[in-house]
Amino acid sequence: MPVGELCIRQVVVTARTTSVLETAKLMRLHHVGDIVITDGVAGRRVPVGIVTDRDIVLEVLAQELDATSLSAGDIMSSDLVTVRENEGVFQTIQLMRAKGARRAPVVNGEGVLVGIVSVDDLVELLAEELSQLAKLVAREQKLEAELRR
């Protein structure tokens, strides 16, 4: 399955220049724990970084810095792991594991943001797949038991 079929398509984004305080308010407003930082390139949103609620706590609040004077660009993780929307789920998992990324913006062939995928999304998919396999095993065991009576 391509990760583009699994990803969340409505991504909360902001610019590098948005204050950390405004970034936190966007997270609260949209009930998300991360915001993708994008640059506008020819009218398209290209991901350049990501800010998580954890980044805000560790990089700003815990150091008693002013959340109004720092920008999202100041604290964003710029070693961004992106995944192409036609990439397979298994390959996405391998990449995220190798890079230690809990979430990855999903881009199209031109590098334009189309969604985001998280470890939670992948675990949910895999749990459903394992559940279906478990049902298959139980069904086969039941059929075998009925045939041997």
Image (spheres, grey):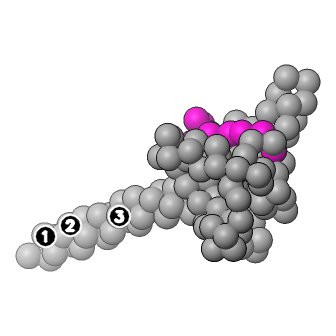
Q: Kindly report the distance in space between the C-alpha atoms of the residues bearing marks 2 and 1.
A: 5 Å
Is label 1 in a helix, a strand or a loop?
Answer: helix
Judge by depth and name the residue closer to the eye, 110 or 149. 110
Residue 129, image x, y percentages: 43, 60
Residue 9 in sight in this render: yes
- Residue at point 77% right, 60% down? 75
Q: Which residue is mark 1?
A: 146
Q: Of tags 3 and 1, which is closer to the observer?
A: 3
The C terminus - image quarter = bottom left
Which quarter of the figure has residue 103? bottom right
Which quadrant would residue 146 be assigned to in this image? bottom left
- Name the side, left or right, on which 92 lies relative to 82: left
Q: Amino acid at mark 1?
A: Glu
Counting from the top left corner in percent of width and height, residue 3 is at 64, 48
Residue sitting at 58 percent across and 35 percent down? 10
Tag 2: amino acid: Leu
In percent of width and height, residue 134 lies at: 33, 69
Q: Is residue 84 visible?
A: no
Q: Which residue is mark 2?
A: 143
SS label for mark 3: helix
The kind of residue on which mark 3 rests is Ser
Q: CA distance from mark 3 to mark 1?
A: 23 Å
Q: Quadrant of residue 107?
A: top right
Say left or right for 76 vs 128.
right
To which residue does mark 3 refer? 131
Q: Are marks 2 and 1 in contact (CB under 8 Å)?
A: yes
- Seen from the viewer's position, the closer of residues 73 and 143 is 73
Whole-percent x, y for residue 4 in the image? 65, 42
Magenta-drawn segment: 8-16
Main secondary structure along the magenta-highlighted residues: loop
Q: Are marks 2 and 3 in contact (CB under 8 Å)?
A: no
Q: Residue at coordinates 71% horizontally, 65% vertically from top-left? A: 65
